[in-house]
Image: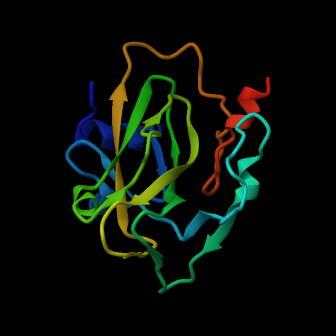
């Protein structure tokens, strides 16, 4: 069951769902909360390697951290992909999952907010990494602090037995893929 604004507000007041910082009057919609784009990004370096070997390579070495100064923006060109993250730190209890959706106003100009990672597990704690692409025909200037995506909460039939304890728990900024950690086991 998707939670309404009334249920979200109540759970946040009780501390069941935590979103910090959050201005509920501006960010709360009828069935979710708008999250803002931070000023931290990871871009992918140009490389002469023919491919990434997921079992051997630390993908973090293929990225470069970029921090945008206040009042500036990041220009994402057509066909480019980068990682960003939310301003907000999210904490979910063991009986609530969430989904991340792009905002339609950004989708209508070609911005994709997540490639595949739209699901947030119960027990999640941290900032959310965003997989940002520009599939439009023109460069787009992205300003940190804009309402960039929307989180929708779903109540589970019962609390989970396996709380999320994955490799991205506690993320404090954009995090590159760590798939090599699970493939090398």
Image height check: is 51 above or below 23? above
| x and y percentages locating residue 141 in the rendered image | 39, 77
Q: Residue at x 28, y 55 (%)?
A: 103
> If the image is split into quadrants, where does the N terminus sit?
top left
Q: Is residue 120 left or right of residue 66?
A: left
Front residue of 173 and 20: 173
| x and y percentages locating residue 77 in the rendered image | 43, 72
Q: Name the colour scheme.
A: rainbow
Q: Quadrant of residue 168?
A: top right
| x and y percentages locating residue 84 in the rendered image | 53, 60
Front residue of 180 and 118: 180
Front residue of 31 and 106: 106
> If the image is split into quadrants, where does the C terminus sit?
top right
| x and y percentages locating residue 169 in the rendered image | 65, 39
Q: Residue at x 43, y 71 (%)?
A: 145
Q: Residue at x 34, y 60 (%)?
A: 135
Image height check: is 27 above or below 160? below
Image height check: is 23 above or below 163? below
Q: Residue at x 50, y 30 (%)?
A: 121
Numbered circles on residues, count: 0
């Amino acid at each position: 069951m998707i939670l309404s604004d009334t249920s979200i507000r109540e759970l946040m007041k009780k501390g069941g769902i935590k979103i910090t910082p959050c201005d509920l009057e501006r960010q709360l919609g009828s069935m979710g909360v708008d999250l803002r784009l931070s000023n931290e990004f990871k871009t992918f370096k140009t490389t002469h390697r023919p491919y990434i070997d997921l079992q051997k390579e630390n993908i973090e070495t293929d990225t470069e951290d970029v921090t945008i100064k206040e009042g500036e923006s990041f220009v994402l060109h057509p066909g480019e992909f980068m990682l960003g993250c939310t301003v907000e730190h999210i904490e979910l209890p063991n009986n609530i999952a969430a989904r991340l959706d792009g905002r339609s106003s950004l989708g209508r100009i070609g911005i994709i907010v997540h490639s595949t990672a739209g699901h947030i597990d119960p027990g999640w704690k941290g900032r959310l990494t965003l997989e940002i692409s520009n599939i439009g025909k023109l460069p787009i200037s992205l300003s940190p602090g804009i309402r960039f995506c929307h989180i929708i909460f779903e109540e589970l039939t019962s609390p989970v037995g396996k709380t999320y304890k994955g490799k991205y728990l506690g993320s404090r900024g954009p995090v590159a893929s760590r798939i090599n950690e699970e493939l090398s086991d």
